[in-house]
Each structure stands twice: as structure tokens, then as C-alpha cells.
Amino acid sequence: MTSINSETAVHLNKLNLIFDGQPVLKDLSLSVFHGNKVTLTGPSGSGKSTVLRCILGLVMPDSGTITILGEPVTRHNIWQKRRHIAYVAQEPDLGTGSVKEVIETPFTFRANAGLRDNLARLPEIMERFNLPQLLLDKQITRLSGGEKQRIALIIAILLDRPIVLLDEASSALDTKNKQAVADYFRQAGNTTVLSVAHDSEWMGFATRVVDMNEIQKM
């Protein structure tokens, strides 16, 4: 049984979800504490990515509760809760335009206008992620899969959300760049990271690795 207290960033309590007659999540409970780096692992179909989608409100469980930063998530407040979360998919949809334009676009939205000064951190983070400054002038559609993943991760970092969800977001990175990303998040002590991954390199970064089969009553 997981517990919820003031140190819990994300709390899942007995989530159940059936899709096409098959159980995807069954009595899943999990607490992720502030600043922890938790990685979900398990075979394909065990519900790892579904957990992230439930937290985002993109999928609603059939039963159970989700609490973010101490407040239960409902259909009515999910948009507000998303302001506390950054999400990076395995194949991020970054749209079109130059890399610089893509990075700056989220900061043109009213909800993020107060974060625009964070763009001053862009050169430093690009250097840490082994991305040259010249890349900013390149069309986003011409980037490699690994470059797109790192750009999406940089946007998530600059948005300064307390909770970051990563769905195989380092899968296209080689060992050196995967280590650079892991090191960055490891040092971001106040940021809570819940990730989905298969490879041992990424799991080595986690403060906790959770096997989906072990925490569900399948």
C-alpha cells in the first residue's frame, strides 16, 4: 500500500483500466516523492506509457485516483494540473520551423509568458547536451531522432515544471548523450522525474526502478 503525504509529488491509488476487454492497469498504486527520479520498467503491454498518459489526463482510468502535488485530479482541473508537468515522448512532435523558433514557441503562450527569461539558459543546456549553437538555425524537420529528443528535453527543462514525465525520451541517444541527459536530471534535485525506459544505462540514473508486473495484481 502506498502512502500520500506532503512529500508526495504524484500518487496513484488502485488504478484500474480495461481496454478492448483486456486489463491494462490492475490495482496499480505508486507514490513518487518530490525530487525522486523513478523509472518504470516491464515488458511491452504492461502499462508503462499508459501510466504517464493517465497522469496527464489523456486517458481516464476506470477506477482509482490520481493525486498531483497533494490535489486529486479530476476532469475539471486536469488543465490546471498540466501546468505543473512537462512531458517528452519517444518521438516528440515538434512541428515545423527552425529549432530556435520551435524552442521559443511555448514561451509565446500566455501561461508561459512569465518564464521567457529562462531562454537565457538555452546556450548552457545545449552545451551540456552536446548540441552546437549552429543547430538553432536548422529546420527542426532535418534533425536526427536523437537531436529531436534532446531539443524536446531542453524545452521541458526551460518550462521549469516541478514534475517531468519521460516516455522512452532517451531511446535515440547514444551512451554519451544519454549520460549527459541523465546527469542533468540527477543534479536537478528539486525536479521530480517519472520515466519509462528499458535500457540499463538509463535505469542506472534512477533513484528507484519500479517493475510494473510487481506492483500490479495481474
Image (tube, grey):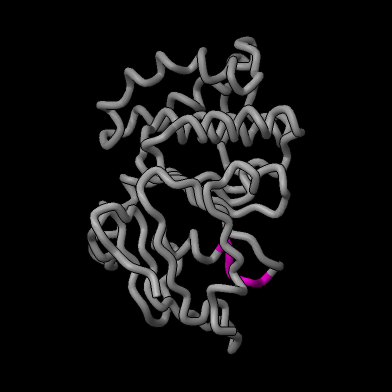
Based on the picture, tell me whether residue 92 belongs to the magenta stretch.
no
In the image, residue 173 sits, relative to residue 44, either above or below, namely above
Quadrant in which the C terminus appears? bottom right
Tell me if residue 197 can be seen: yes
Question: Of 144 and 209, which appears nearest the observer?
Answer: 209
In the image, residue 4 sits, relative to residue 89, either above or below, namely below
Tell me if residue 79 can be seen: no
Part of the protein shown in magenta: 45-49
Q: Is residue 50 rendered to the left or right of residue 84?
A: right
Q: Is residue 85 rendered to the left or right of residue 156?
A: left
Residue found 27% across the figure and 37% down from its top: 111
Question: Of 160 and 1, which appears nearest the observer?
Answer: 1
Dominant secondary structure of the magenta stretch? loop
Residue found 40% across the figure and 13% down from its top: 120
Residue found 33% across the figure and 73% down from its top: 65
Residue found 43% across the figure and 66% down from its top: 30
Q: Is residue 17 rendered to the left or right of residue 127?
A: left
Q: Position of residue 202 (x, y in %)?
A: 66, 44
Q: Position of residue 164 (x, y in %)?
A: 45, 44
In the image, residue 169 sits, relative to residue 116, either above or below, namely below
Based on the picture, tell me whether residue 47 belongs to the magenta stretch.
yes
Q: Position of residue 125 (x, y in %)?
A: 52, 20
Question: Of 217 and 124, which appears nearest the observer?
Answer: 217
Question: Of 21 and 41, which appears nearest the observer?
Answer: 41
Within the image, what quadrant is residue 177 found in?
A: top right
Quadrant in which the N terminus appears? bottom left
